[in-house]
Each structure stands twice: as C-alpha cells, then as structure tokens.
Amino acid sequence: MRNFDELSEQEILALAISSEEEDRHIYLDVAEGLRADYAATAQMFLDMAAEEDQHRRWLIDLYQQKFGEHIPLVKREHVRGFVQRKPVWQLQPLNLGAVRRRAEEMEFDAAQFYRRAAARSTDASIRKLLGDLALVEAKHERAAERIMQENLTEEALADETETARKMLVLRFIQPGLAGLMDGSVSTLAPVFAAAFASGSSWEAFLVGLAASIGAGISMGFAEALSDNGSLTGRGAPLLRGVVCGVMTTLGGIGHTLPFLIGDFHVAMIFAIAVVVVELAVISWVRWKYMDTPPVSAAMQVGFGGALVFAAGVLIGGG
C-alpha cells in the first residue's frame, strides 16, 4: 500500500474515478437487496447510483483533459488510510436504518477526505484538483439528502417501517422466542428433577448443562430445516437456526448456572428466581412483538412453566 501523499495528480484522479465506480456498484447492490420489500428505499439507491455514474463521467472528462485516455488502476485498498467500503453481501440481512446511514456516511466520508487532502497540498494545481474533487463529493452529499427526501415520503417511511417490523418478527423474534421458550421451559423438568433426586448442586448443573446444549442443537437444526424462507419470507434458514439454537441454550443455561453455588438450598432459591425472570421475559416478548395481551401472555407462559416445574419436582422428589 502507498501513502496518499505519495500519489501523483494522475493517480489521485484515477483513485477518485475507481471510488465513484465502486460506490455506484454498492448502491446498485443495496437497491437490488431491498427491491422486494422496500421499494421506496430501493428507488432512492437507484437514483443515488445514477448520481454516482454522472459524477464518474465528470471525473473521466477531467482526467482526459489532463492526462489522456489511459486510466491506471488505483483503488481504495491500494492507498493507506483511504476510506474502504465493505461489500453488500457482508451486510446481509440488510437493515433499513443501517443502509440509509451508510449512504450518508459514504458521501460525507468522501467529501471530508478530499477536503483534508486539498488542505494539505502546497502545489497550486494539485490544490485546485483536490478542491474540485471536494466540491464534487460535497454535491454527492447534498444529492443524497435531496434524493432521500424525494423518495422517502412519510407514507413510504411508515409502510417500510411496518415491513421492517414484520421482517424482524419473522426472521429473528419468532425463532428466538421459540428457542427461549423451549430452553426455559423444557429444561425445567430435568434440571429440577436431578436437583431434588440427588440433592447435589453439581449433579443438577451437569444435567442442566447437557439438557441446554442438547436442546439448543436440536432446536437449531429443527428451525433451520423447517423451511428455506423463499415462500414465507422468514429469511436465511441458517441464520434462523443459529438464533433459535443460541436462544434455546441460553434459556436452559439461565436457571442452570445457579447450581454452581455449592450450597444446595441457596442454589435452589436463585434457580427458582431465575425461572421467574425467564418466564417474565418470555411474556414480555410475546406481548411486545406477538400482539398477545399481557395478562394472557403471562398466564399462558406461567401455567406452562408451572406444569413442567411440578413434573420435575414430582419426578425428582419421588
């Protein structure tokens, strides 16, 4: 990699051209990724890609006037300290707020970079060239704001916010809630049965740990294999499986960890307290995201948890 201050005027302009081309591709990739669910924001990114293409043509015209037809390949990754962009596939699944902020940051960072570069230059022609580039990037920044205002009306924003909420529920909340419920409730019986049967905190901990990990693996595979998301819109099956599996394990681990306490009775008190917190969290999530009335959610979850807990106590105590 080379330092920016080592680049010639020709290389700096070539760098600007390649940067505009890369930003255009990023905007097109984002637009394609959002097109199915967020049409207004996708159109915004298509318009911004068109703006980048226009700026690229301006820069090429300037380059031809100064240096001729051949443009050397100078890219961001070739220059130390230059702002680099992650490819869109590394940002999946695309989040509306994140991609909008990224568009603003891309334009702002580019403008700031050229302003600082122009301020450091002592050569008149280089300062003028860099200053012109800073002005072009500043136009990008204002264009991003203008295009966003034109495309993202209040109605469009409201529709896309509701769609984003539905996608969050389908792709993360539902599999996570299913895992949390399974881990928190289904492991109650083996953990407390082992605790009451053995009277040993360590034995209960081992059983709870095994049950939690086993349930997490099982639920993760079950969720990942349930559907591929192409028809239901539930997103990538691998991601759903990971979310479900991790939440299942966490749900079981929560009331298992207190049994690391050596005193059996103290460990039991803490474990029961954790169970109450887990069931309260599940009830809150069902009320917040699944439109379940709070009282109904609490009663349903509490009743199910009480039944499983009683089964564990009866089996272990017997």
Image (tube, grey):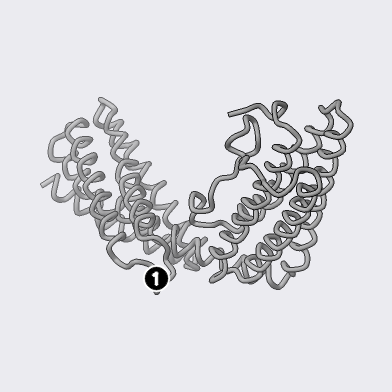
User: Residue 37's spot in the image, x, y percent?
Assistant: 55, 70
Asked whether 8 or 181 is in front, the reply is 8
**Residue 232 is drawn in which quadrant?**
bottom left
User: Residue 302's spot in the image, x, y percent?
Assistant: 36, 57
Residue at image position (27%, 33%) is 259
**Residue 224 is drawn in which quadrant?**
bottom left
Residue at image position (73%, 38%) is 10
Check disc 1 and give the amino acid type.
Ser
In the image: residue 219, left or right of residue 127:
left
Q: Is residue 110 above or below residue 239?
A: above
In the image: residue 47, left or right of residue 163:
right
User: Residue 25's spot in the image, x, y percent?
Assistant: 60, 56
**Residue 191 is drawn in which quadrant?**
top left
What number of labels is visible? 1
Please identify the residue farthest to the left as the structure is shown.
318
Q: Quadrant of the N terminus?
A: top right
Please identify the residue farthest to the right as the structure is shown.
124
In the image: residue 119, left or right of residue 2:
right
Asked whether 53 or 228 is in front, the reply is 53
Asked whether 164 or 265 is in front, the reply is 164
- Residue that mark 1 sits on: 230
Residue at image position (36%, 53%) is 180
Residue at image position (30%, 51%) is 183
> Quick one: SS at disc 1?
loop
Label 1: few (<14), some (14–19) or many (≥20) C-alpha neighbours in 10 Å? few
User: Residue 290's spot in the image, x, y percent?
Assistant: 47, 66
